[in-house]
Amino acid sequence: MPKGPISEFIEAHYLHFNAATLVDAAKAWRTLLDEDGWMLVTLAGAMSTAELGKSLAEMIRRGKVHGIVCTGANLEEDVFNLVAHSHYVRVPHYRTLSSEDEEALLARHLNRVTDTCIPEEEAMRRLEHYMLAEWEKADRAGERYLPHEYFYRVIRSGALQEHYEIDPKDSWMVAAAERDLPLFVPGWEDSTLGNIFAARCLDGHVKNPLTVRSGIEYMMRLADWYTQTTRSHRIGFFQIGGGIAGDFPICVVPMLHQDLRRTEVPLWAYFCQISDSTTSYGSYSGAVPNEKITWGKLAADTPKFVIESDATIVAPLIFAYVMGW
């Protein structure tokens, strides 16, 4: 693959410590793809509000990412940004905000994520309108879908296009919907729209809470996807941050081996985590990759990388290298 100016800069200057690990991880990702492997990416934190879609969407379109596990927040916040970007408020002095400053933002219905405030009315309530219509429609028909499938239905309907405030090529959810990318969203109820769905069940707009399918069903789908895919493609695991987005999917392999006795299913073929969590054996997010060997997730010879840095800096650089930019 040809190397563009970003890749050449990285190879020339990223020579030691975390920088060198970044290069090693990016090269190993390209090697996996060259050998017909696939990559699963997990998104924790606020990567969508950080506008990671500017590079992740192109990774999806170019076939460099084959599945995504994300929090409910990352699922919805990419679409919030898509339809309400001009109403976001950046707070570059967020480190010096007082409690009174925070209350002033609350009064303006601005929900702060570090240096960026998401506008309730233009983002959350706007998307709720379209999602509620899909929830109610499915509820009346006795149908049930996974959380991301409702997002796909809304995006593919074209109903949101009049509200687009960024180029849709920079939305990873639009790219995912275009390719029907496998998505897995554990703990979706821990999100703004998850909370809103619960409220709509409580007030009777949706009669059956099971209209949105559960995390257990996501694990079942992930198990089947992993089993089927690894018959022809090894799968790597690229983890951004920690928490449920990473913990949930990596456990599918020991579950397949130990609980379903599918011992022919291979382990993860690659592992990389971008994290600023302090290395610690008492913290899952801070555990070094070798600890995963004892749980039956990785092998001794699995390529393993930990990049201790800010994912908003590191992930776009790795994506650029994988794409040859």
Image (spheres, rainbow, N blue to C red):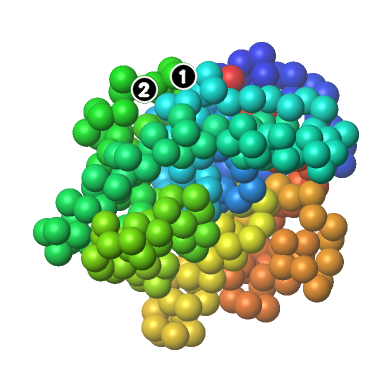
- Between 161 and 224, the one lying in front of the other is 161
The residue sitting at 44% across, 85% down in the picture is: 259
- Between 244 and 191, the one lying in front of the other is 191
Query: Whole-percent x and y of residue 15?
Result: 84, 32
Query: Whole-percent x and y of residue 188?
Result: 46, 58
The label shown at residue 166 is: 1
The residue sitting at 33% across, 61% down in the picture is: 203
Question: Which image quadrant is residue 112 in?
Answer: top right
Residue 290 vs 61, above or below: the answer is below
> Where the C terminus falls, by quadrant?
top right
The residue sitting at 31% across, 28% down in the picture is: 160
The label shown at residue 134 is: none
User: Is 235 placed left or right of 304 in the picture?
Assistant: left
Please give the count of numbered marks on the rendered protein.
Answer: 2
Query: Whole-percent x and y of residue 264?
Result: 41, 75
The residue sitting at 66% across, 57% down in the picture is: 242
Question: Which image quadrant is residue 7 in?
Answer: top right
- Between 316 and 18, the one lying in front of the other is 316
Secondary structure type for disc 1: loop
Front label number (1 vs 2): 2
Query: Whole-percent x and y of residue 320?
Result: 60, 26
Residue 157 vs 145, above or below: the answer is above
Q: Residues within 10 Å of mark 1 (few under 14, many from 20)?
A: some
Residue 128 vs 84, above or below: the answer is below
The label shown at residue 163 is: 2
